[in-house]
Image (cartoon, grey):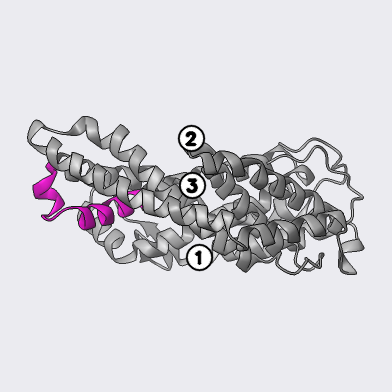
């Protein structure tokens, strides 16, 4: 996300208006292409814009007085509809690009039926999406945003300078991330220290994924929220801050791949009349290998974020924004 420049004296309310406007324009700019439904990318971008806008309303809630209808709840309802269709697009891409080339000849007819099941599901989802964008909820939300952007209303705090408040806005978010129980999935506690389970012990790692996978999924959502919020303020910090936000994106992607694996398993459960290992053994084997690969990629990040020294470095960085912040955001 880009803000042209960051003025160190900018008031928090005006800074919030810039962030909100940028993401609102991104949303409405994708609307027609989404309805045309010829390319999955506009839908993805519109969904990201919705998520960022909802995040902005959360982090700037002490600085702005939004218009009626311009709420996290109204955004969430539209974003949920976008997300359902987008998730099916991601599933189709994975099926066609990753799993289809693995098939043995006896598996192809079954796989074709699975794709047909997915396409039918996606058609129904897109119909719901059209109704949402062309009904009352989404246009009401747009009018509320446009009205506020034309005549923004701020709280008293919204008139104060942003720079001194940046650490207080970000530190609680990162502290919540540090305290998330997802960092402990796939670990054992030895002498009061969390130690990642050896990659050789795949049986235990697989068991923990089965039992605690939802906690890792929730950790991904927490990482994504912190990343979006941190990106809003990247112009107030040195380059190392940008590196940290890029790292958050990488971790989000790693956990996202794991969640895609879980969703894929669930989809096959609904689309097949026999177990996946019987109907599509090539795909079942690949999905299992993906879980093994996940731990190899994830554990270095896990060790880093379990490190007390690393966490203190993060806190120190957040506590010292640049005094000279008038520079382009990354």
Which x, y percent locates residue 242? 66, 41
- The residue tagged 3 is 251
Residue ID at (70%, 67%): 69
Quadrant of the image containing the N terminus = top right
Q: CB under 8 Å between callouts 1 and 3?
A: no
Quadrant of the image containing the C terminus = top right
Q: Tell us which disc is closer to us: 1 or 2.
A: 2
- The residue tagged 2 is 39
Mark 1 surroundings: few (<14), some (14-19) or many (≥20) residues within 10 A: some
Q: Which structural element holds mark 3?
A: helix
Q: Nearer the viewer, residue 150 or 120?
A: 120
Which x, y percent locates residue 298? 40, 47
* Mark 1 vs 3, N-terminal side: 1
Is residue 25 a member of the stretch shown in magenta? Answer: no
* Mark 1 vs 2, N-terminal side: 2
Residue ID at (70%, 62%): 57
Residue ID at (62%, 62%): 136
Q: Nearer the viewer, residue 213 or 283?
A: 283
**Separation of residues labelled 1 and 3 (CA atoms):** 14 Å
**Separation of residues labelled 1 and 2 (CA atoms):** 36 Å
- The residue tagged 1 is 180
- Please give the range of residues in magenta: 259-281
Q: Tell us which disc is closer to us: 3 or 2.
A: 2
């Amino acid at each position: 996300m880009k803000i042209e420049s960051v003025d160190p004296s900018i008031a928090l309310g005006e800074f919030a208006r810039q962030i909100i406007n940028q993401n609102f324009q991104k949303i409405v700019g994708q609307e027609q292409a989404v309805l045309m439904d010829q390319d999955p990318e506009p839908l993805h971008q519109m969904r990201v814009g919705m998520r960022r806008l909802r995040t902005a309303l959360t982090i700037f809630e002490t600085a702005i007085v939004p218009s009626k209808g311009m709420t996290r709840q109204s955004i969430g309802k539209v974003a949920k509809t976008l997300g359902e269709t987008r998730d099916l697009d991601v599933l189709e891409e994975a099926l066609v690009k990753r799993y289809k080339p693995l098939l043995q000849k006896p598996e192809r007819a079954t796989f074709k039926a699975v794709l047909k099941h997915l396409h039918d599901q996606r058609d129904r989802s897109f119909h719901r999406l059209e109704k949402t964008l062309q009904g009352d909820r989404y246009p009401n939300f747009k009018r509320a945003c446009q009205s506020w952007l034309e005549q923004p209303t701020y709280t008293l705090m919204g008139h104060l300078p942003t720079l001194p408040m940046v650490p207080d806005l970000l530190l609680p978010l990162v502290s919540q991330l540090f305290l998330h129980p997802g960092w402990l999935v796939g670990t054992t506690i030895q002498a009061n220290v969390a130690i990642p389970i050896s990659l050789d012990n795949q049986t235990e790692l697989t068991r923990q994924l089965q039992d605690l996978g939802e906690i890792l999924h929730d950790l991904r959502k927490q990482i994504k929220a912190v990343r979006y919020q941190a990106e809003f303020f990247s112009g107030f910090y040195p380059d190392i801050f940008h590196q940290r936000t890029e790292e958050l994106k990488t971790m989000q992607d790693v956990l996202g791949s794991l969640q895609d694996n879980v969703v894929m398993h669930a989809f096959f459960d609904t689309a097949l009349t026999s177990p996946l290992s019987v109907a599509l053994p090539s795909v079942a084997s690949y999905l299992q290998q993906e879980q093994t690969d996940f731990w190899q990629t994830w554990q270095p990040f896990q060790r880093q974020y379990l490190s007390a020294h690393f966490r203190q470095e993060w806190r120190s960085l957040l506590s010292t924004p640049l005094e000279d912040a008038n520079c382009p955001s990354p």
